[in-house]
């Protein structure tokens, strides 16, 4: 095999490093006694903190019981004039029982195309978990969440978070609960960007409106 000059130079550099470090003692294991959270270990406090940080990112936050959820989702869709809603595989049918909006099911055998998604007003999903300290919702394309395009194209995303079961305090606590091989989507507020004059524009590369429903007892 012919060695290119770039690869040959790299091999020479690595060989010199190995020679220089030969016989050196092994590096000590790094100390990992850092704090994994800056919040009290209190589920109610974490849910309140999540609510506060979601709102700070301009998400609309509501709280409901499981029984109130269908009527709340129906009201949220109606208030925003959503005549159609994308439905990911595995989304509980009861969640949309109160709405008259057209349900557009996205399935493996019949995925919604880009033009269909663009013409769909809203999407309703569950989530993998939520991070209180950063106001972040994490999706992993599991049941009730669907593929990433479902939550990027429609202009309105209603995301249901089960509190406190799906709420963690911090990123270090979130990562062990997530499967790294899954397609993770991290959402902190509605899609937004700013130009050089700091004029904020929402809905450029994702939903213009993010509504989070915290469902608990």
Image: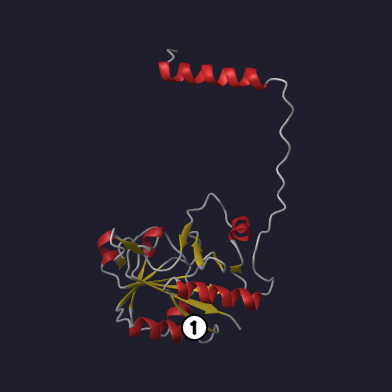
Between 152 and 145, the one nearer to me in the picture: 152
Q: Quadrant of residue 166?
A: bottom right
Quarter the C terminus occupies: bottom right
Residue name at image x 47 percent, y 16 percent: 8
- x, y percentage for residue 141? 47, 59
> What's the residue at 52%, 84% (across, down)?
64
Q: Residue at x 30, y 66 (%)?
A: 201
* Residue 163 shows in this picture: no
Q: Viewer-proximal residue, 201 or 180?
A: 201
Task: Tell me the crowding category of disc 1: few under 14, some 14 to 19, or many 20 or more residues within 10 angstroms, Cα based.
Answer: many
Q: Work out whether residue 143 or residue 78 is closer to the camera in this orientation and state it.
A: 78
* Residue sitting at the far front: 197
Q: Quadrant of residue 199?
A: bottom left
The number of numbered discs placed on residues in the rendered structure image is 1
Q: Is residue 189 left or right of residue 49?
A: left
**Residue 97, above or below 111:** below
Q: How is the image coloured?
A: secondary structure
Q: Is residue 110 left or right of residue 145?
A: left
Residue 200 rendering spot, x and y as whole percentages: 31, 67
Left or right: 56 as drawn, with respect to 109: right
- State the quadrant of the N terminus: top left
SS type, badge 1? helix
Q: Residue at x 47, y 60 (%)?
A: 186
Looking at the picture, how far across and down is residue 30, in whole percent? 70, 43
Q: Is residue 169 above or below residue 14?
A: below
Spot occupied by residue 33 in the image (x, y as percentages of width and height): 72, 53
**Relative to 44, does residue 185 appear above or below in the rendering?**
above
The answer to whether any part of residue 87 appears in the image is: yes
The residue that mark 1 highlights is 69
């Amino acid at each position: 095999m012919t060695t290119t000059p770039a690869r040959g130079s790299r091999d020479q550099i690595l060989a010199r490093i190995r020679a220089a470090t030969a016989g050196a003692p092994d590096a000590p294991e790094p100390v990992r006694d850092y704090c994994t959270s800056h919040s009290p270990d209190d589920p109610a406090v974490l849910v309140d903190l999540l609510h506060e940080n979601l709102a700070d990112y301009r998400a609309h936050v509501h709280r409901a019981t499981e029984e109130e959820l269908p009527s709340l989702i129906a009201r949220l869709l109606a208030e925003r004039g959503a005549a159609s809603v994308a439905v990911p595989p595995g989304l509980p049918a009861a969640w949309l029982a109160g709405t008259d909006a057209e349900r557009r099911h996205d399935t493996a055998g019949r995925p919604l195309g880009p033009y269909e998604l663009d013409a769909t007003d809203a999407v309703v999903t569950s989530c993998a978990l939520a991070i209180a300290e950063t106001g972040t919702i994490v999706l992993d394309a599991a049941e009730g969440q669907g593929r990433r395009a479902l939550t990027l194209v429609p202009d309105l995303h209603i995301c249901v978070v089960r509190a406190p079961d799906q709420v963690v305090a911090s990123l270090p606590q979130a990562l062990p609960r997530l499967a790294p091989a899954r397609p993770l989507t991290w959402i902190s507020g509605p899609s937004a960007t700013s130009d050089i004059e700091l004029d904020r524009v929402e809905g450029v590369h994702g939903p213009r409106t993010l509504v989070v429903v915290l469902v608990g007892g």
